[in-house]
Image (tube, rainbow, N blue to C red):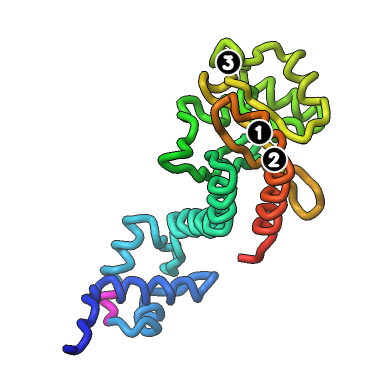
Amino acid sequence: MGEARRPTLIASVQRALRLMEAVASHPSGAPAKQLAREAGLPLATAYHLLRTLAHEGYATRLPDGAWLLGERVEALHGRSRTQQLLARLRPTLVELRDELGVASYFGMHVDDEIRLIDIADGPRTPRVDVWVGFEDAAHATALGKCVLSQFDEETRRDYLSRHPLVDLTPHTITEPGRLLRSLATSAALRFDREEYALGTGCAAVPVTDATGSAVGALAISCRPARLPRIERSAHRLHATADRIQRALTLPG
């Protein structure tokens, strides 16, 4: 066997990363000369890299000459947190998909909106065609109705006042009074019986945090005729929701 090939490394990328690490180590900022010294770079190289990073939004220069990390770094960090969350949730959704033979979904209440966070589907378990965003169709989806049912009545009415009850199929509930009455009832599962898309039924259970406060919902989609079988498997959905709740509380 010959010697293993060494990976091709791009020196300019390595230098830029070392420089960003130096910038990050100074919460109040630091001048280019100090950053160049700490990163082991010639001053001219450091200046060129800092200007490039600033142009791309990854660094910013204060009026006194000190350099800080730019806004795009925080944006990347936020996306990284989302990816870490998905890495913890995806195996649980996939397991439920394979166990029940359905597409599985997780949604959360984020910034006053109900957002779809992740989906586990496959060739034999296709997802529902998300042709209208879940944030605009909570009234017509099991996931959305499950989250809404966890709100108090005032919060529920406020949400619905900002989101018209759009008629998506002949089965969509578009009367506010009827929808509010259905949300106020207790139920082991919340259903969407072809209210979002014809030919597709959905069921959902709530996901709470460690204090029992509403966080989101776990849902599945399938052919409407399979919903009675899913209803008999409600305990499996609740068990999966508990696993998601524990995953959400993990550090990192």
Q: Position of residue 26 (x, y in %)?
A: 51, 74
Q: Is residue 159 above or below residue 175?
A: below
**Residue at 55%, 39% in the rendered image:** 116
Amino acid type assigned to the residue bearing label 1 in the image: Arg
Number of numbered callouts drawn: 3
Q: Secondary structure at mark 3?
A: loop
Q: Which residue is mark 2?
A: 233
Relative horizontal placement of residue 19, taking residue 224 as reference (left or right): left
Task: Check disc 2 and report its element: helix, strand or loop.
Answer: loop
Is residue 248 placed above or below 105 in the rendered structure?
Answer: below
Q: Which residues are magenta?
A: 42-46
Asked if residue 44 lies in the magenta stretch, the reply is: yes
Is residue 17 shown left or right of residue 78? left
Q: Marks 1 and 3, Cα distance to the nearest angstrom?
A: 29 Å
The crowd level at tag 1 (other Cα within 10 Å; few <14, some 14-19, many 20+) is: few
Kindly report the distance in space between the C-alpha atoms of the residues bearing marks 2 and 3: 31 Å
x then y, percent, for residue 126: 46, 36
Q: Quadrant of residue 17?
A: bottom left
Q: What residue lies at 40% left-to-right and 62% top-to-bottom?
A: 59
- Residue 37: image quadrant is bottom left
